[in-house]
Image (tube, rainbow, N blue to C red):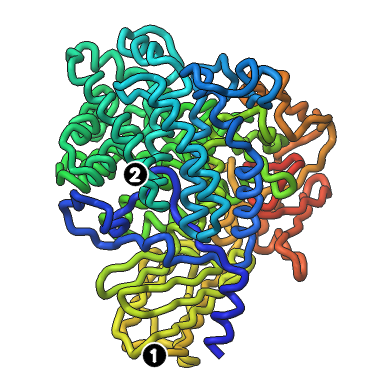
C-alpha cells in the first residue's frame, strides 16, 4: 500500500524549498569552502529532499510560476542594458521593448531589484523540478547581466542604475536605497550558483563583491556611519554567503562592514529601540547578524538576534504574525491603536520567517515553529490573490478594509519581489533533522526523502481544516531514529497512534512528542490535534480581540459594497496607492460584537462540510460568516472586534 501512495503523490508533487539567499545550516555543503563554526540543534534539508503534494500551497506556487515566466527576459534586462549603453533593441528599445512600470520604471532609483528576486525564484523552481524552462530563462538573464557588467568597465560594478547612486549614499545625500537593490542582485546570482550550478553567476557576483570591497575599503568610519543610515536590505547576509562559497576574507570584511551599530548595539543591552523604525530596514540586519554568529561564533550576535525576535513577536506583532503600521514598528503592546489600512507589510513577514529559520536551527525551540506556522498560514498563504496570482503589500487590520493586490507589470513593489519568493518556498520549514532526530514542524501535504537514512516520509493532511495528519514511513531497511512531532501551543489532549496502537503522551502543548524506535517500511503514524475556537485579546485592551481556530485567524466576510474598479487591485496611474489607499468603508460597517456572555465556542457554529463558521450578534441580529483570513479575497473583512 505504501508504495502505491508514494507513486500517486509523486505525480502531483512539487519540490519547493527556500528562496533568496537561501542558505541555511546543513545545506550546500559541497559548495562551501568555509563551513559554519558552531554546532546546530537542527539542520535544514536540501531542496531536492522535500516535495509538496496537492494542496492550496501547490496552487499558489503554480500561479506564482506562471507570473514569473510571463515576464520576458528583454523586459527584465532593459534597465540594465540602458544603464550600460548595451544594445536593448531598435532605437534603444523605444518601441520594441514593453517596458516594466512601477518600481521598475527607468526613472525609479530602485530599478533592478525585481530581476534579482526572479533569479532566486527561477533558481528554486529549477532546483525543485529540474524543468529546463526555468534554467533556460535564468541562463539568458545571467548571460545578459554578464554583457552589462563587461560594458560597465573592469571594476565589476553591475546594476540597472549608475554607480553615482552609491556615491550619493556614501556622501549622505538623498537617494532611494541602492545597496538594498544590489542585495537582491547579489542574492539572486548566489542562488543561481547554489541551486543551478551556474558558474557564470558566481563569476559575476564575485566581481561585484570585489568592486564593493574596493569601493568601501577606503572609506572613513564617518563615511561608513553616514552610509549605513540608508536602507541596505540583507546585503551582510549575501557577503557572508559569498565568503563561505569562495573563502575570500574580503567578503567577510564586507559583511562585518555592514554591521549597523546605531541600530543593533542597543539590542545588545536589551533595549527595545524598535518604535518608529522602518521595519523592513531593521529586520534583514538581524539575518546578517545571526549569519555572523553561525560563521564566527560571536555570542553577542546571538543575544542580539534572540532579543530582537522575542521583542518583535511578543510585543510588536498582530494576531496574524504580521507587524508594522505604515511600514514602521509602533510602541510595544499597542496593537489596538494601530488597526489601520496599512498594517502588516509582507516583506517584514518574509524576513521574519528567514530569521526564524536560522534561530530554529540554532536552538530547535518549538516557539520558532509556532511563530512560523502562524505567520505562514495567516499572512503569507493569503498574500496571493487566488484569482490572478497578484500579491498584496499590506494585510490591513482596519475593520472593513480589503487586501489591495499588485498589477502584473506596473507595480513591482518590494512586496512583489519577496512575493515571487514567498509563494514558491512552502516546503522549506516543514522538516528539520539531526543525525538522530527528525522534526515535523509544519502540517502540510508533502514528501520528504531523508537521504542519509534511506527513509521517505509522506505526510497527508487537510490541515488547518482539521487537526489530523498521517505520516507514512517508507524505509530501505529498519532504521533507528527519533520522530519529533511538534505539539502546538493551540492544541490540547493530542492523540498519536503508531501502527494503530495509541502511545502515551506525557508532554504538554508547546513541546515535541518524541517517538524513538526502529522504523520499518510501511509504518504508519496517525496524529490528531484538537482544534478549538478562541478569543485573543490585544495586550493592552482586553475588549479588542481577534478570533482564532487553532493557529488560524478567522475574519468575518463583509461584502463588496463601495468597492469600485480597479479595486481590489492597485491603480498604476496613482503613485504608490497602496500607501494612501482610500477603502471607502461604508458608514454603517461596524466591528462591535455582542456575544451576550456566551463562550466563543458556543457562539460560533461550524458550517457542515465547509471551512467556515457562523455567528449571530445578540444585539443587532446580524449574521456573520467567518473564514480563515488566508481564504478571504476580493472583499471586505473584519479581523479585530470591539467586544460589547
Q: Is residue 194 visible?
A: yes
Looking at the image, which residue is at 52% across and 53% down? 125
Any part of residue 540 in sight: no
Front in this rendered view, residue 573 or 346: 573
**How packed is label 2: few (under 14 Cα within 10 Å), some, or many (20 or more)?**
few
Q: Residue 310, labelled with which disc?
A: 2
Secondary element type, mark 1:
loop
Between the C-alphas of marks 1 and 2, the distance is 40 Å
**Quadrant (top left/top right/bottom left/bottom right) for the C terminus:** top right
Q: Position of residue 419 (x, y in %)?
A: 55, 41
In the rendered image, the vertical position of residue 228 relative to residue 233, given as above or below: above
Front one among 393 and 238: 238
505 is higher (above) or lower (below) than 221: below
Q: Which mark is residue 340?
A: none
- Mark 1 or mark 2: name the one nearer the start of the chain: 2
Percent across and percent down for residue 75 are 61, 30
Q: Which mark identifies residue 520?
A: 1
Judge from the rendering whether residue 382 lies leftward or rightward of residue 85; answer left or right: right
- Which-is-in-front pick, marks 1 and 2? 1
Amino acid at each position: 500500500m505504501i508504495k502505491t501512495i508514494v507513486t500517486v503523490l509523486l505525480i502531483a508533487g512539487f519540490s519547493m524549498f527556500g528562496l533568496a539567499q537561501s542558505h541555511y545550516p546543513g545545506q550546500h555543503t559541497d559548495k562551501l569552502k568555509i563551513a559554519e563554526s558552531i554546532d546546530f540543534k537542527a539542520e535544514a534539508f536540501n531542496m531536492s529532499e522535500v516535495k509538496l503534494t496537492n494542496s492550496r500551497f501547490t496552487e499558489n506556487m503554480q500561479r506564482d510560476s506562471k507570473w514569473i515566466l510571463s515576464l520576458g527576459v528583454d523586459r527584465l534586462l532593459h534597465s540594465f542594458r540602458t544603464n550600460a549603453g548595451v544594445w536593448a533593441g531598435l532605437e534603444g528599445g523605444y518601441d520594441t521593448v514593453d517596458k516594466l512600470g512601477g518600481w521598475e520604471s527607468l526613472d525609479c532609483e530602485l530599478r533592478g531589484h525585481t530581476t534579482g528576486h526572479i533569479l532566486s525564484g527561477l533558481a528554486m523552481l529549477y532546483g525543485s523540478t529540474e524543468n529546463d524552462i526555468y534554467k533556460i530563462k535564468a541562463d539568458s538573464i545571467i548571460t545578459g547581466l554578464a554583457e552589462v557588467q563587461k560594458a560597465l568597465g573592469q571594476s565589476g560594478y553591475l546594476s540597472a542604475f549608475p554607480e553615482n547612486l552609491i556615491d550619493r549614499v556614501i556622501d549622505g545625500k538623498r537617494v532611494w536605497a541602492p545597496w538594498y537593490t544590489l542585495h537582491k542582485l547579489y542574492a539572486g546570482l548566489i542562488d543561481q550558483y547554489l541551486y543551478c550550478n551556474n558558474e557564470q553567476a558566481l563569476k559575476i557576483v564575485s566581481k561585484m563583491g570585489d568592486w564593493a570591497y574596493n569601493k568601501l575599503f577606503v572609506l572613513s568610519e564617518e563615511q561608513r556611519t553616514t552610509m549605513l543610515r540608508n536602507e541596505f536590505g540583507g546585503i551582510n547576509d549575501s557577503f557572508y554567503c559569498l565568503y563561505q562559497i569562495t573563502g575570500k576574507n574580503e567578503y567577510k570584511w564586507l559583511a562585518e562592514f555592514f554591521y549597523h551599530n546605531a541600530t543593533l548595539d542597543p539590542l545588545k543591552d536589551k533595549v527595545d529601540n524598535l518604535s518608529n523604525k522602518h521595519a523592513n530596514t531593521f529586520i534583514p540586519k538581524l539575518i546578517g547578524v545571526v549569519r555572523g554568529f553561525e560563521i564566527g561564533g560571536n555570542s553577542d550576535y546571538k543575544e542580539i538576534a534572540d532579543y530582537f525576535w522575542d521583542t518583535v513577536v511578543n510585543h510588536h506583532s498582530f494576531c496574524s504574525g504580521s507587524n508594522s503600521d505604515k511600514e514602521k514598528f509602533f510602541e510595544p503592546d499597542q496593537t489596538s491603536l494601530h488597526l489601520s489600512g496599512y498594517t502588516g507589510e509582507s516583506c517584514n513577514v518574509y524576513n521574519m520567517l528567514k530569521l526564524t529559520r536560522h534561530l530554529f536551527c540554532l536552538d530547535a525551540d518549538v516557539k520558532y515553529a509556532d511563530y512560523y506556522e502562524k505567520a505562514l498560514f495567516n499572512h503569507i498563504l493569503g498574500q496571493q490573490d487566488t484569482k490572478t496570482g497578484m500579491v498584496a503589500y499590506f494585510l490591513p487590520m482596519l475593520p472593513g478594509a480589503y487586501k489591495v493586490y499588485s498589477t502584473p507589470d506596473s507595480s513591482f513593489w518590494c512586496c512583489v519581489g519577496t512575493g515571487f519568493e514567498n509563494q514558491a518556498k512552502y516546503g522549506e520549514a516543514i522538516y528539520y533533522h539531526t543525525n538522530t532526530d527528525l522534526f515535523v514542524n509544519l502540517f502540510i501535504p508533502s514528501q520528504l526523502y531523508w537521504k542519509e537514512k534511506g527513509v521517505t516520509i509522506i505526510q497527508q493532511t487537510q490541515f488547518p481544516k482539521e487537526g489530523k495528519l498521517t505520516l507514512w514511513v517508507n524505509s530501505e531497511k529498519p532504521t533507528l531514529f527519533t520522530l519529533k512531532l511538534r505539539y502546538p501551543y493551540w492544541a490540547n489532549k493530542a492523540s498519536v497512534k503508531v501502527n494503530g496502537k495509541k502511545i502515551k503522551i506525557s508532554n504538554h502543548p508547546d513541546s515535541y512528542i518524541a517517538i524513538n524506535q526502529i522504523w520499518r517500511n510501511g509504518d504508519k503514524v496517525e496524529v490528531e490535534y484538537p482544534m478549538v475556537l478562541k478569543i485573543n485579546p490585544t495586550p493592552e485592551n482586553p475588549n479588542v480581540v481577534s478570533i482564532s481556530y487553532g493557529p488560524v485567524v478567522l475574519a468575518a466576510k463583509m461584502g463588496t459594497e463601495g468597492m469600485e474598479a480597479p479595486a481590489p487591485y492597485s491603480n498604476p496611474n496613482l503613485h504608490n496607492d497602496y500607501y494612501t489607499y482610500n477603502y471607502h468603508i461604508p458608514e454603517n460597517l461596524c466591528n462591535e460584537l455582542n456575544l451576550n456572555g456566551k463562550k466563543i465556542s458556543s457562539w460560533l457554529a461550524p458550517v457542515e462540510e465547509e471551512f467556515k463558521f457562523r455567528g449571530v450578534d445578540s444585539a443587532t441580529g446580524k449574521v456573520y460568516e467567518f473564514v480563515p483570513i488566508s481564504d478571504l479575497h476580493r472583499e471586505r473583512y473584519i479581523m479585530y472586534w470591539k467586544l460589547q
